[in-house]
Image (tube, helix red, strand yellow):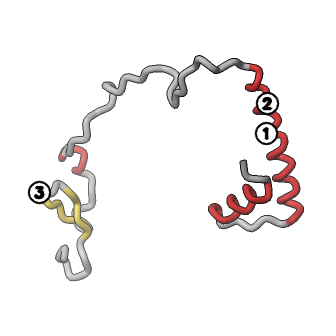
Amino acid sequence: MKNKEEIIKHLEEVTKIRLTEEEKEKFSADLDKFANSLKTFDAFDLTNVKPSYRPYPVELSFLRSDEVNIENTKNIDTNSYNFDKETNLFVLKTKEGNND
C-alpha cells in the first residue's frame, strides 16, 4: 500500500488542488482514522465468501429501452436546431443556417 504522502500527492494531482502543509497534516490524520476504522472488518472470517460487487441479484427489466420518441421533442426550439430524420438527432444550426 502507498504511504500517506504518496496518497495525498496523488489526490492533489487528480483533483488539481494544492493543499497547505497544515491541510496535509489534517488530511493525514483523517486517513489514519479511516484506516483504523477498517480494522473492524478484520474480525470477520471471509475465507469462504465469494467476492461480489453487488451483494444481491438485480433485475434491470424495469428500465426503458433507448428509443427516440418524437413526441418528447415538440418543445425544442426549432429556430436553433434542425432535426435530421436520417440519424434521429437534433443538429445545431450554424450562423449561416446550414449544418455543415
Of residues 49 and 30, the one nearer the viewer is 49
Q: Residue furthest bottom?
A: 96
The mark lying in front, picked from 3 and 2, is 2
Q: Quadrant of residue 47?
A: top right
Q: Tell me which numbered mark, 3 or 1, is placed earlier along the sequence.
A: 1
Residue that carries the numbered disc 1 in the rendered image? 35
SS category of the residue bearing label 2:
helix
Residue that carries the numbered disc 3 in the rendered image? 85
Residue that carries the numbered disc 2 in the rendered image? 39
Q: Position of residue 30 (x, y in %)?
A: 82, 46
Q: Is mark 3 in CB contact (under 8 Å) with mark 1?
A: no
SS category of the residue bearing label 1:
helix
Calculate the distance from the C-alpha at mark 3 to the C-alpha at mark 1.
56 Å
87 vs 96: above or below: above
User: Type of residue at label 3?
Assistant: Lys
Q: Is mark 1 in CB contact (under 8 Å) with mark 2?
A: yes
Left or right: 2 in relation to 99: right
The mark lying in front, picked from 3 and 1, is 1
